[in-house]
Image (tube, rainbow, N blue to C red):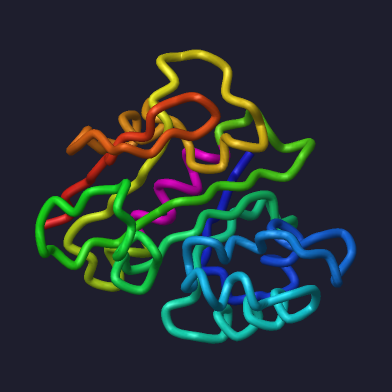
Amino acid sequence: MAIDVRPATVFEDVATLVGPRRPDANVCWCLSYRIGAKENQELRGTMRGDRVRELVGTDPPPGVLAYDGDEVVGWAAVHPRADTSFARNRRIPHLDDLDVWSVWCFRVRPGHRKRGIVHHLLAGAVAFARERGAPAVEGYPVDNRGEKVDLTMAYVGTRAVFEQAGFVKAADTTSVLAGFPRVLMRLDLR
């Protein structure tokens, strides 16, 4: 399996990974942390997909996509923290004033899970941020201590995945997801 990770510049591929089956459904579209709470609540139905289409057309795009050949198989959201709700999040601490990037959401298509695609996505997200001058990348995964994480809550990743990519635990948070504490993991790129 040769997985290629690329910037998320093709809306249809992003929609395949994070969009709903019905275009008018009110699902996340991976917008919850990317835009402000007010805008996130106001966007309904097809407006959510329209907003993602706008973000895909910006520089930098809102994340990276993993491809197995021509088939899109994974998504990771990665962007400068200052442009996300993590810039204002009270449960996720700020370590310093470094212009870090955040990676906060992973999605792997059914039928492609348990093949290490999340590891490719995280490596691709780091490379994407590095190429754009990020001094460091942060993630906020669950510290599940090897216990199973509910699939609907596994989108933030696990501490072990980040550690395997060279990230180190930089701080505890007061955020809890699916009963597991989230930790702030950081990879210094300087």
Asked whether, in this view, residue 181 is left or right of residue 67, the answer is left
Give the position of the C terminus as an image quadrant.
bottom left
Residue 71 at what x, y percent from top left? 74, 56
Q: Is residue 99 magenta?
A: no
Against 98, residue 9 (above or below) is below
Classified by dominant secondary structure, the portion drawn in magenta counts as helix
Q: Nearer the viewer, residue 166 or 180?
A: 180
Q: What residue is shown at x 48% (from left), y 37% (from top)?
A: 157
Q: Nearer the viewer, residue 33 or 8?
A: 33
* Residue 54 position by quadrant: bottom right
Give the position of the N terminus as an image quadrant.
top right
Number of labels in the image equals: 0
What stretch of residues is rendered in magenta? 117-127
Q: What residue is shown at x 41% (from left), y 56% (from top)?
A: 125
Q: What residue is shown at x 50% (from left), y 69% (from top)?
A: 37
Q: Is residue 122 magenta?
A: yes
Residue 34 at what x, y percent from top left? 48, 67
Q: Nearer the viewer, residue 148 or 69?
A: 148
Q: What residue is shown at x 29% (from left), y 50% (from top)?
A: 138
Residue 170 at what x, y percent from top left? 18, 38
Against 108, residue 19 (above or below) is below
Against 96, residue 13 (above or below) is below
Residue 160 at what x, y percent from top left? 38, 25
